[in-house]
Amino acid sequence: MKILIIEDQRELSDSIVSFLSKEDYFCEQAFTFSEALMKVDIYEYDCVLLDLMLPGGTGLDVLRKIKERSPQTGVIIVSAKDSVEDKVAGLKIGADDYLAKPFHLPELSMRIFALLRRKDFSNSNILRSGPLEIDLLSKQVSVGEKRTDLTKTEYELLLFLIENRKRVVSKSALAEHLSGDMADMMDDFNFVYAHIKNLKAKLADAGLTDCIKTYYGTGYKWGLEE
Amino acid sequence: MKSLLNKSLSQFLVCAVIILFLSAPLFYLLTKYFYAEDLINVIEATRHGNQIPALDLEEDIAIGMTIQLLLIFAVLSCSLFITLRFITRKLWKPFDETLQRTEHFNLAQDDIPQFPKTKIKEFDRLNQSLKKLMKRDKSTYRIQKEFAENASHELQTPIAITRSKLDLLMQEQLNERQMHLVSSLYDLNTRMEHLNRNLLLLAKIENAQYTKMEFIELGDFIQNSLASYDMFLHGLSLTLIDGRVKKSLIRANTVLLSCLLNNLIINAIRHTVASNGEIRINLEEGRISISNESDDGPLDECILFQRFRSGDSKLVGNGLGLAIVKAICDYHDWKIQYSFLNRRHVFTVIFNKAVII
């Protein structure tokens, strides 16, 4: 999988590359508008992370170029400009997803994962981890043959943890992922703890004990291997 | 270009002279029929050899003087009245227009108004200095506005970088002490981001950047968003009580409206101490109130909606939530009220123009 990261902040770009390197992704970086235009013109990527505010031009022009050259490339707009207009403009031109800065890297990783899965038609809509199966279309979770009923929040939590399975995910990242628009109003993330507890109990009932490892109450990691 | 004093004096003089000329026949007739009347009679009588008629010189002088005085008074009043009434009004018209345009000037929206051209020195000076003042205000305002927005945008980058580094740090093999340090850094990072985003939101509201207005049925709007609060409830209940007879539409910006409701509802959830408390959303004609139970007394209404107010720190998140609520209400010309009723904190938003359908 080839990913192009178009982001003028070198440090942020490097962090993203370093975080994504755990997957089988091949990451390339572009730091300016002209560099970005050149790269999308010459190479083809599976996924492009695109910052809208670039030195030398607007990311929307890069997006147009990508859509013109290789329409099948997935594009996630990443921008500090979290205004509705930018989002609408980007999605209209053909971006697949939109992520407002600042974001958590596990969130980005999950979005890329979801995007690539959507783009790859050969991929099934079943996500597996050990005996656990998630049907992404019907949002059904089952362990072995047995169905497990999860609330919407618990399902989102489970999906987020599984899609970041090789990593430790912070409580803060989970909270942002769950609360979305309302994140700005929440200053403590203890609600995450309660939902994790419920999710763990339900999975334990289904026979999956210790599938979520807790790191001193601040980080979580999906513990089942394939 | 003339000064105001010269202009009005000369106009008054011109007017007085014109009226004096116009009233000249009157003076002529007055002189002829009162002062000269007896003399004419004497001349006539002498010419025809008649007896000299009886003279009423005394009476004529008295009546003539009175009429003369009245006439002079009338002429002067007339010219004064005309100058003041018509000429002065015309003279001050540019001033009036300048005043009107200044009164309607809105720093946030309008361009600098075009003042009417004038030949009067003082008015011209006034217009020039007003123009200069407005220009300066406008640029100061723009700089300030841009500063608030730019500062927020610029801050977002280091916050984003810090956050990404924390996410990376989290992947290292950390011991418990290090993990707790990272965790508190995460909390700080999140607080910074929320503060920053809320400040940006406030700046944007104050700069009137949410221009898209829609008609919204509040009952449906809330009903559709109720589920999104589920994850914060933990045993608390959230009920919507629609006490309206008919559905009604309010005119609002959807982004801001949901921000307002989120703030009030999340606030109510956060400050409900009882583990099975109830948060109520009461919808009535033209108003909505959101209330939660409380063990404490009423809050201080005076400082409730201020930014970063000090005081009971457990009552607020980052000190901006209610300030945002207030700003959104002001933006839509709604009223926000706080009251403490039956041991409940009640926040009421009163809409001004609910359209009943």
Image (tube, rainbow, N blue to C red):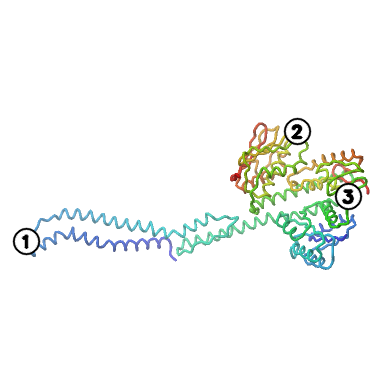
- Residue B328 in view, yes or no: yes
Q: Secondary structure at mark 1?
A: loop
Mark 2 and mark 3: span between their CA atoms? 37 Å
Residue bearing mark 2: B276
* Residue B329 pos. (x, y %): 63, 46
For the point 87% across and 39% down, the residue is A202
Amino acid residing under circle 1? Asn
Q: Secondary structure at mark 2?
A: loop
Mark 1 and mark 2: span between their CA atoms? 127 Å
Q: Is residue B12 above or below residue A162?
A: below
Say which of marks 2 and 3 sits in front. Answer: 3
Say which of marks 3 and 1 sits in front. Answer: 3
For the point 58% across and 58% down, the residue is B110
Residue bearing mark 3: A127
Residues packed near mark 1 inside 10 Å, few (<14), some (14 to 19) or many (20 plus): few
* Residue B37 pos. (x, y %): 16, 59
Tell me, yes or no, whether the two marked residues, 1 and 2, touch with CB atoms within 8 Å. Answer: no
Pointers 1 and 2 within a single chain: yes
Q: Is A23 on the left-hand or right-hand side of B343?
A: right
Q: Earlier in the sequence, mark 1 or mark 2?
A: 1
Mark 3 and mark 1: span between their CA atoms? 142 Å
- Front residue (pair A99, A104): A99
